[in-house]
Image (cartoon, grey):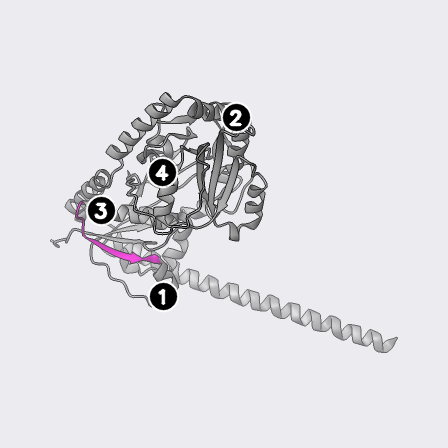
Amino acid sequence: MKIHIQGLNIIGYTESMFGLGEAVRLNINAAKKLDIPLNLINYEKVKQNTSYQYSLNYDVNLVQLSLKDLESFIAIIDPNLFKNKYSILFLVWESEYIAPELVENLDLFNEIWTPSEYCKNIFQKAYKNPIIIVPHPVEVHLNPLQNNNTIDFFDGKKFSFLFMFSFHSSTERKNPFFLIEAFKTAFGASDDVELVIKTVGGKQHKKQKQRLEQCTSKNIKIYDLELDKNSVDHLINTCDAYVSMHHSEGFGLTLAEAMYLGKPTIATNYSGNTEFMNDNNSFLIDYKLSYIENPDRNFCSKTLWANPLLSDAVEKLRNAYEFSDLRTKKAVNAELFVKENLSFYAVGTIIKNRLNYIYTNFDELVTNQNQSVYLINQLQLAKIENAQLRREIHRMKKNVIIRFIVFLKNKTRKLKRTN
C-alpha cells in the first residue's frame, strides 16, 4: 500500500487581484493556519505558457476556478493532475440555473467544495459526487495606509452607506440601480445621509459606468478606481453601514468583511449571504423569486434569482439609519458571529478534517482515475481538432469572399468597357 504524504496541491489564480484570486488566497491562509502543507500552482502562468513547469507534490488537488474557466482548464492542464490523485473543484455560482455546457466536465472531479448551502443545492442538480461546504474565511487586519493623498470618500457630517462591486462580475446581478432607487425613495435629497458606490472596471465597461454616473446627486457619489486590499478594508471600516441589494451572491464576501469590522449590514435575504446573515445580526430585505430581466454575458435568460422588494428595502434603509440602538445591537452580533464561525482557524479546521478523511480512505475513494485521464486526453485532442477545423472553415470563408469580390470587380470592369 502506498504511503501518502498529506498535503494539498492548490491550482488557481494565486497572485491575481480580482475576486477569484482573493478567494483562493483566503483558502490558502486558512490551510496555513492549520499547518497543512501546500504546493501552489498559479493557473494564470499555466494559461500564458503551455511549457510552464509545475509539480504535483501531493495526492490531493484543489482546483479553484470559475465554471467558465473549466473548459479551457481541461484543454491545457497536464492529465497527470488526475492520475491516481483525488481532485477537488472549488466552485461558486449565483443562479438557480446552470447552462448544461458549463457542467459537462464536472464528473472528472472526485468532489466539489463550495462556500454555501445555496451553491450546494445548485450543484446537486448536475453533480452526484460529494459536495462539501467550505465557507470563505473572513479575517480583516487593518494596516496603516501608505498613501497620504487618499480620497475622502465620505462626508464626515453625513451618515454614509457604502456598496462596492466590480463591473467585471455582473452589473445586472449586483443590482446597483435598484439600490439607488431605494436610497432615493428612502431619503430623497437629504443632507444628513449619503450613498457611496465604489466600483472597479469602468474603463472596460464604459456604457454601464456612464449610466451609473448619471445617477449621481449631492448625496449619491460614484468612484471607479482600483484600490489595494488594505485600502478597501479601510474604506469598509470608515462607512457607517454596508449595503447590498443583489439578485444573488454565492457567498457575499464584502458583507461578511463589513460584519467582521462591526458594521451594520443591509442585504437581500437570499442566496449565499444568508449562511451568515440573519435577523439578529443584519437588516434583511424581502424578495420575490423571478427570472432575470436583462440577460448579460454572464447570465442567460433562464437565470432565476431574487428581486428585492422596494418597499421593504426602503424600510430597512430607514431603520438602519434612524434606530441607533438596533443598528449597534445587530452590528455587535454580526461581528461576534463572523469572528467565531468564519475565522481562518474555523475554516482551516473544516479543510483539515476533510483532508484527513480523504487520505485515510484514499485507496477506496480514488477509483477510475486512469479512465478520467483517458477522457481528458480525448477531450484535449478533440478540442485541438475542433480548433483546426474552425481555422480551416474561417480560411475557406475568407477565400470565398475574396473570390466573390474579385468576380464582382471583373464584372464591373467588363460592364464599363461595354459602356
Q: Is residue 12 above or below residue 99?
A: below
Q: Residues within 10 Å of mark 3 (few under 14, many from 20)?
A: many
Foreground: disc 2 or disc 3: 2
Task: Identify the disc placed on residue 31.
Answer: 3
Task: Identify the disc placed on residue 237.
Answer: 4
Task: Identify the disc placed on residue 50.
Answer: 1
Task: Identify the disc placed on residue 186.
Answer: 2
Real-space CA distance between mark 2 and mark 4, rounded to the nearest whole angstrom: 24 Å
Q: Could you tell me the amino acid type at mark 4?
A: Asn
Cβ atoms at labels 2 and 1 below 8 Å apart: no
Real-space CA distance between mark 1 and mark 4, rounded to the nearest whole angstrom: 42 Å
Q: Could you tell me the amino acid type at mark 1?
A: Thr
Q: Position of residue 90 (x, y in %)?
A: 32, 46
Q: Could you tell me the amino acid type at mark 2?
A: Ala
Of label 1 and label 4, which has the lower sequence position?
Answer: 1
Task: Identify the disc placed on residue 156.
Answer: none
Q: Position of residue 127 (x, y in %)?
A: 35, 41
| Mark 3 residue element | helix
